[in-house]
Image: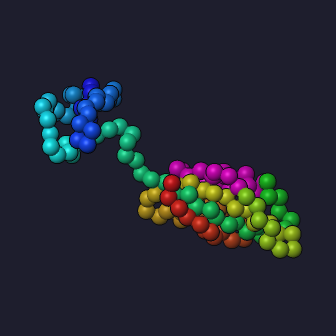
Amino acid sequence: MCLLWHQHLRDECRLVQMPGLRTADLPLCEMSQTEQPLRVPGLRVQGAVSMGKVAAKMKIMPESPDIDLDDLQERLEASLPEGAKINGFERDEVAFGLVALLPTVIVPDDAGGTEAAEESFSDVDGVESVSVENVGRI
């Protein structure tokens, strides 16, 4: 199926291929010319609209400087709630040999936001505190 794209400024017309769009999906009729944008409120394009995601940089403080950070990192990854993933870790030397882990967590943009990830991280053995440093939509 093809849609006609008309640009008034250049008086050009071109066809845009729409291989995933089937005429059986919605009623379409040919139009010789239109002066206003064509609005199709019932049009559904698979995969085009999805819930957004949020990237949150969190600060995980271990209970002591003696904790193996590689092991703690693995336990944090294993404790993630469904739908969340870690997109990398950074380390920040805080003081006196204490190093904080700074994971960037990607979670769905729905009710609750990062709360589920925060709760699961705080339940991991060896974690003293969890705080959200930065949040942004992606």
Q: Is residue 9 above or below residue 121?
A: above
Q: How many labels were placed on the picture?
A: 0
Residue 75 at least partly seen: no
Image quadrant where residue 81 sits: bottom right
- Residue drawn at x 83%, y 74% is 95
Where residue 59 sits: x, y (%)? 68, 66
Magenta region includes residue 30: no
Q: According to the image, what is the colour scheme of the structure? A: rainbow
The part of the chain drawn in magenta is 71-89
Where residue 27 sits: x, y (%)? 16, 33
- Residue drawn at x 60%, y 56% is 105
Quarter of the figure that contains the N terminus: top left
Q: Is residue 72 left or right of residue 106?
A: right
Of all residues shown, which one is farthest toward the bottom?
A: 95
Residue 32 at least partly seen: yes
Where residue 107 sits: x, y (%)? 53, 55
- Residue drawn at x 32%, y 38% is 45
Image quadrant where residue 46 sits: top left
Q: Is residue 33 left or right of residue 91?
A: left
Q: Is residue 104 left or right of residue 52?
A: right
Where residue 6 sits: x, y (%)? 24, 36
Magenta region includes residue 73: yes
- Residue drawn at x 80%, y 67% is 93
